[in-house]
Image: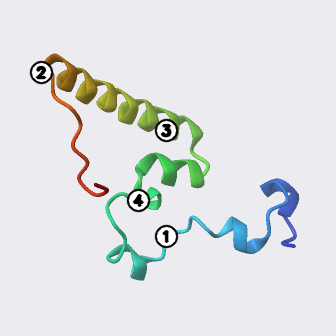
């Protein structure tokens, strides 16, 4: 266990590094990978307030898209998983 494991919920070093974004992998990851989300990055870096603001923006965009679809009696068409 890492020396500061208590600060990280008792996680092992492996578990603490799971969401780290390796620059060599970035080009290989799909755009839907959670590690690319700004709110996730901010949360990982400990910037809770900025992460919350970003998450609120993402959720509002989702609500806006859904409202537009409903107003136009359209249904969501998945881009990546059909």
Residue 2, percent across and down?
A: 84, 72
Q: Quadrant of residue 5?
A: bottom right
- Are the residues flagged by discs 1 and 4 in contact, CB closer than 8 Å? yes
Placement of 77 over or under 71, stated as above or below: below
Where disc 1 sits, the SS reads: loop
Q: Which residue is mark 1?
A: 21
Tell me the mark number nearer the camera, choosing from 4 and 3. Answer: 4
Of the numbered discs 2 and 3, the one sitting upstream in the chain is 3
Gap in Å between the C-alphas at discs 4 and 3? 16 Å
Residue 17, percent across and down?
A: 64, 70
Residue 47, percent across and down?
A: 57, 45
Dot 3 surroundings within 10 Å: few (below 14), some, or many (20 or more)? some
Gap in Å between the C-alphas at discs 3 and 1? 19 Å
Which residue is drawn at the image coordinates 62% and 68% (left, top)? 18
Q: How is the image coloured?
A: rainbow
Please state, as top left, top right, bottom left or bottom right, where the C terminus lies in the image. Answer: bottom left
Of the numbered discs 1 and 2, the one sitting upstream in the chain is 1
- Are the residues flagged by discs 4 and 3 in contact, CB closer than 8 Å? no
Q: Which residue is mark 2?
A: 72
Tell me the mark number nearer the camera, choosing from 3 and 1. Answer: 1
């Amino acid at each position: 266990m890492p020396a500061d494991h208590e600060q990280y919920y008792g996680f092992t070093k492996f578990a603490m590094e799971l969401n780290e974004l390796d620059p060599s992998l970035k080009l290989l990851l799909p755009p839907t990978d959670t590690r690319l989300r700004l709110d996730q990055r901010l949360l990982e870096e400990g910037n809770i307030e900025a992460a919350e603001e970003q998450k609120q923006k993402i959720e509002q965009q989702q609500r806006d898209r859904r409202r537009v679809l409903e107003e136009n009696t359209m249904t969501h068409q998945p881009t990546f998983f059909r």
